[in-house]
Image (tube, grey):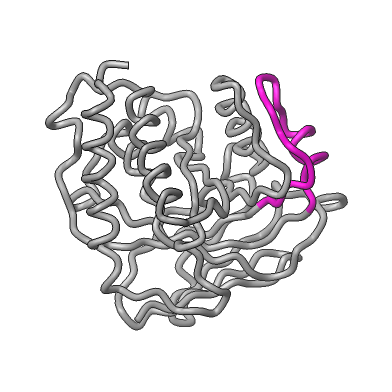
């Protein structure tokens, strides 16, 4: 790590304030080009600590940058990871207020709910599926705090991978008998189809992203607890949002989830 504790705490306070106050900022590596990956995750952890201290609870984990092409473009060999808290949750069919967001975008996802803890290193797709209680459709609302969505990877990790809101809905189904790679996905915006895809859009298999998350935790001598909900990453490009927009996600066999922006 290259940043001292005081700098990490200051940057965490700044980024969280931008999230809470719905205001943007320049990417933090402009001021701290020496930041390394451990610094970025330490800032993210400090943001989480601030939320927990105010009584919020962790409601899930999330994976981002979950396509091989995007990872190659960004010069990394695994996705980025963040946390979700209960204050981010929107009920299925519920509303998100644009006044609380900066420049939101929507991503369709497949969500996993664990019945057993997962721990790396060496976690793999089979271990994830064996530890999964059920899978469900989910919509993540990403909302980078960086001006004009311009950031580098370390800055976005520090900013909790742009987490802001999420919806989980549809029909919870055990993964047994489902081929998550070939599940068809349709995302509609105001009744018009804006994205089509399949589970394989996430690293060839969405459980691969969850395995990488477990290995990320394992490298830090941590595990993903039983009962954790995990959003495995966007199945398409993120779609921009405006006030009044209604999004509906349909995932083959898993039903639908929806959100409206007001």
Residue 15: x, y in percent?
Answer: 25, 46
Residue 248: x, y in percent?
Answer: 53, 74
Q: Quick check: 230 left or right of 147?
A: right
Q: Quick check: 249 left or right of 64?
A: right
Q: Nearer the viewer, residue 254 or 120?
A: 120
In percent of the image, x 68 and y 50: which residue is there?
A: 112
In percent of the image, x 71 and y 64: which residue is there?
A: 252
Residue 172's image quarter? bottom right
Q: Nearer the viewer, residue 61 or 43?
A: 43
Whether 219 is drawn above or below 165: the answer is above
Residue 203: x, y in percent?
Answer: 58, 37
Q: Quadrant of the N terminus?
A: top left
Q: Quick check: 84 left or right of 159?
A: right
Residue 229: x, y in percent?
Answer: 64, 51
In percent of the image, x 77 and y 55: which residue is there?
A: 134
In percent of the image, x 45 and y 63: which residue is there?
A: 87
Which span is picked out in magenta? 112-133
Indicate whether residue 121 is drawn in magenta: yes
């Amino acid at each position: 790590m290259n940043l001292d504790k005081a700098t990490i705490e200051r940057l965490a306070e700044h980024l969280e304030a931008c999230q809470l106050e719905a205001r943007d900022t320049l990417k933090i590596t402009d001021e701290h080009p020496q930041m390394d990956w451990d610094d970025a995750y330490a800032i993210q952890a400090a943001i989480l600590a601030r939320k927990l201290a105010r009584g919020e609870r962790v409601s899930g984990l999330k994976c981002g940058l979950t396509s091989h092409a995007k990872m190659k473009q960004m010069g990394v060999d695994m996705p980025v990871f963040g946390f979700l808290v209960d204050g981010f949750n929107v009920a299925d069919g519920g509303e998100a207020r644009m006044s609380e967001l900066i420049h939101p975008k929507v991503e369709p996802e497949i969500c996993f709910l664990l019945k057993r803890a997962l721990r790396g290193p060496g976690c793999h797709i089979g271990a994830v599926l064996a530890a999964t209680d059920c899978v469900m459709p989910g919509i993540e609302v990403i909302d980078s705090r960086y001006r004009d969505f311009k950031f580098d990877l370390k800055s976005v990790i520090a900013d909790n991978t742009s987490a802001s809101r999420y919806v989980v809905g549809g029909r919870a189904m055990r993964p047994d008998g489902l081929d998550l790679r070939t599940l068809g996905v349709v995302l509609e915006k105001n009744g018009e189809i804006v994205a089509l895809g399949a589970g394989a859009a996430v690293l060839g298999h969405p459980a691969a992203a969850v395995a990488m998350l477990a290995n990320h935790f394992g490298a830090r001598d941590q595990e993903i607890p039983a009962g954790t909900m995990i959003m495995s990453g966007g199945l398409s490009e993120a779609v921009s949002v405006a006030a009044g927009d209604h999004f509906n996600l349909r995932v083959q066999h898993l039903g639908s989830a929806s959100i409206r922006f007001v």
